[in-house]
Image (cartoon, rainbow, N blue to C red):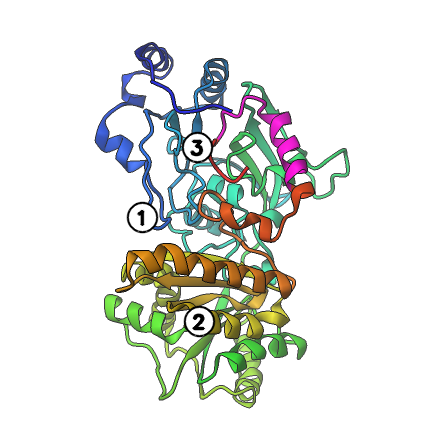
Amino acid sequence: MVQNQTFSQTHVQWFIELLGHANVSENLIDLKNVSSDYTEDLSFLPDLLLIPSNTEQISNILKYCNTHEIPVYTRGAGTGLSGACLPVRGGVVISMKHFNKILNVDTENFQVTVETGVVNAELKEFLKPFGLTYPPDPASMGSSTIGGNIAHGAGGPKAVKYGTTRDYVLNLEVVLPSGDIIWTGANTIKNSTGFSLTHLLIGSEGLLGIITKAVLKLIPLKTDELLMLAAFDDAHKAAQSVNQILLNGFEPAGIELMEVSGVEIAMEFLKIPFPKPENTLFYLLVILDGNDINDLNLTAENLYPFLEESGAIDVYIPNNSEMAADWWKIRRSLGELVKQQSIYKEEDTVVPRSKLPDLISGVKQIGNKYGFRSVCYGHAGDGNLHVNILKDNMSDEHWENQVPQGIIEIFKLCKSLGGTISGEHGIGLVQAPYLKIVLNDVHIQIMRGIKNSFDPKGILNPGKWL
């Protein structure tokens, strides 16, 4: 496995000759910009920043780094929450910012081919005139890239109806550590030809290869959307109502859970009004979509009394599109704004949907036991709860010694409920100490064997969970 080493100016000169001075940087400001992501307050300086423009350049970079055993880290937008892209052993960071082209829209087969530096939301906007869309919609979609979404198997609010990134990737162009360039599959809906290298690369967090292009499945764009907001005075009722909504035949695009303390933080920062009946503790944001607003209104009318019977204090529908946009802004900004309140740890827990009430109750009990405040929100429709643990005025000793014990208990609870320790953020750096709660030695040995087959010298993303 590669280790930290003195970075030679011979290496620097070689990269300059390949990429040009403008795309190779030792500047401290540039290096600091790629030293951290959205994970806590972690920062690690690389030795060099490289900004290639095409797949062949990345191939040559990896051949060189493999020969000289130089650590290589791949970076998209840097919106990750597990530290997966952090250059913990120095070496080079490869920025994918020049890989920002949408190469082909195939309207006959409902596919699009993109470079992996394309921003998720920009792809959605580009596809609108074609009457098509790419459904995965992580909260960071305004800045996160397709490559980063693929590397983490990203989800989003509408995963309950449309699935996650994994459900929309057909084929990938990947540069292996050896410099070899391969396509992992075929541009077909069905493919039963050998092992699925495509799905192996999805969620691989930059450990196996650098993804440069992707062929993505598309679906027809829905023309209309209607939001419903239900306020609850009890977390258990809010979580329990999710399964009841689905069991009773409703098919929302998404069901989002928001703790009132997080909403209050977002309201204050964004100066956006938000319904808040007395005794509210949690909200459910229900997303309905389709091609006929009258049908959506009828669905909402049927769902309205049902939510009240499930324990909602009150149920709201936005008066206009501006109010709906404000509600979405509150939801999508929750994570970022909560984290501005304090040093934090975010745990990306996930359980079978029916077990969500038990998970929420358990998280709050564990927080009381270990003396920490948590703000919870997430994708209730698929059992994915983001637990933000805030340091506030806690002592460093308590933060470093007691809180990790509480996190261990949260993850053990997830496992006991049939879940696991990450639904969409990955393992990266910060979740690595907890991996053995859910994976045994056999799991790890198999994964290490796969890593060694792709990357025998261990140059890709060293120092992380594997």
> Element under label 3?
strand
Tell me the crowding category of disc 2: few under 14, some 14 to 19, or many 20 or more residues within 10 angstroms, Cα based: few
From the viewer's side, name the closer residue of 211 and 320.
211
Left or right side of 121 for 162: right
Q: Earlier in the sequence, mark 1 or mark 2?
A: 1
- Residue 369's mark? 2
Instruction: Give the quadrant of the C terminus.
Output: top right
Residue 244 vertical placement versus 144 (above, below): below
- Point 51% across, 72% down: residue: 360
Q: CA distance from mark 3 to mark 2?
A: 39 Å
- Residue 74's mark? 3
Residue 49, quarter of the rendered image = top left
Q: CA distance from mark 1 to mark 2?
A: 25 Å
Residue range highlighted in magenta: 444-460
Residue at mark 1: 41
- Point 40% across, 52% down: residue: 140
